[in-house]
Amino acid sequence: MAPKAEKKPAAKKPAEEEPAAEKAEKAPAGKKPKAEKRLPAGKSAGKEGGDKKGRKKAKKSVETYKIYIFKVLKQVHPDIGISSKAMSIMNSFINDIFEKLAAEAAKLARYNKKPTITSREIQTSVRLVLPGELAKHAVSEGTKAVTKFTSRNMSDKTVIRESKLPKSREVGE
């Protein structure tokens, strides 16, 4: 058996490039290191947070129903408050109900082979998800809101159409 040859450390090939961080460290003292790419505000490359003095972390907006719950509470019982824990529970409750209604409306649209969820699917899902008298009240309030919205929208469109008519033309000419 032939003796094993000694392994020599592989020399670096000229084609291999070093990372920018290593180049900046090895650069001569007289030359300025190249500027590195910066990430947008709010994002950091690592756990280094010491170099960002004076910058505040941007808050991620979270949509809740808290202000609406509070407004309704004040309409019904102006003298009563609500704790933050109770408010959080109410917010979760509303999210849960809306999720159930949306899932039921999506099922109805799929059963009927319709690509769009309309007010009819929402109304039917309300009747299926909510019990008895609560469903009746919810349907009547929803119908009232949709009617109010469409009548307001139609009046806005009428004003726009009238303003687009040429002033020289009159009805009946």
Image: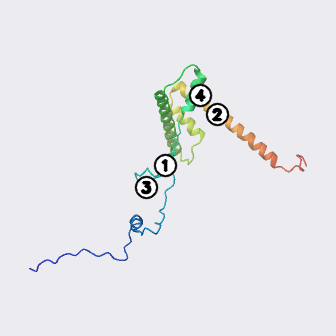
Q: CA distance from mark 3 to mark 1?
A: 16 Å
Task: Identify the amino acid type marked 4.
Answer: Lys
Q: CA distance from mark 3 to mark 2?
A: 48 Å
The one nearer the camera, 78 or 161, is 78
For label 3, the crowd category at 10 Å Cα-Cα, with few meaning under 14, some 14 to 19 and many 20 or more, is: few
Q: CA distance from mark 2 to mark 1?
A: 50 Å
Which residue does the numbered mark 2 point to in the structure image?
145
- In the drawing, does residue 26 fall left or right of residue 140? left
Check the image and report above or below for 2 versus 71. below
Say which element carries label 3. loop
Q: Which residue is mark 3?
A: 45
Do the residues bearing badges 3 and 1 touch, measured as CB atoms within 8 Å? Answer: no
Instruction: Label 4: state its secondary structure.
Output: helix
Which mark lies nearer to you, 3 or 1?
Answer: 1
Q: In the image, what residue occupies the spot 89% across and 47% down?
A: 170
Q: Nearer the viewer, residue 78 or 154?
A: 78
**Residue 34: % across, % down:** 47, 66
Pointer 1: residues within 10 angstroms few (<14), some, or many (20+)? few
Tag 1: residue type?
Lys
Amino acid, disc 2: Ala
Q: Which residue is mark 1?
A: 53
Query: Label 4 belongs to which residue?
Result: 71
Binning the other alpha carbons within 10 Å of mark 2 as few (below 14), some (14 to 19) or many (20 upward) gives few
Q: Residue at x 63, y 33 (%)?
A: 143
| Type of the residue with mark 3 | Ala
What separation in Å lies between label 3 and label 4 (alpha carbons)? 43 Å
- Earlier sequence position, callout 3 versus callout 2: 3
State which tag comes first along the sequence, 4 or 2: 4
Q: Which mark is residue 83?
A: none
Q: Position of residue 156 (x, y in %)?
A: 74, 41
Give the mark, 2 or 1, whose residue is nearer the N terminus: 1
Distance between mark 4 and mark 2 Cα atoms: 17 Å
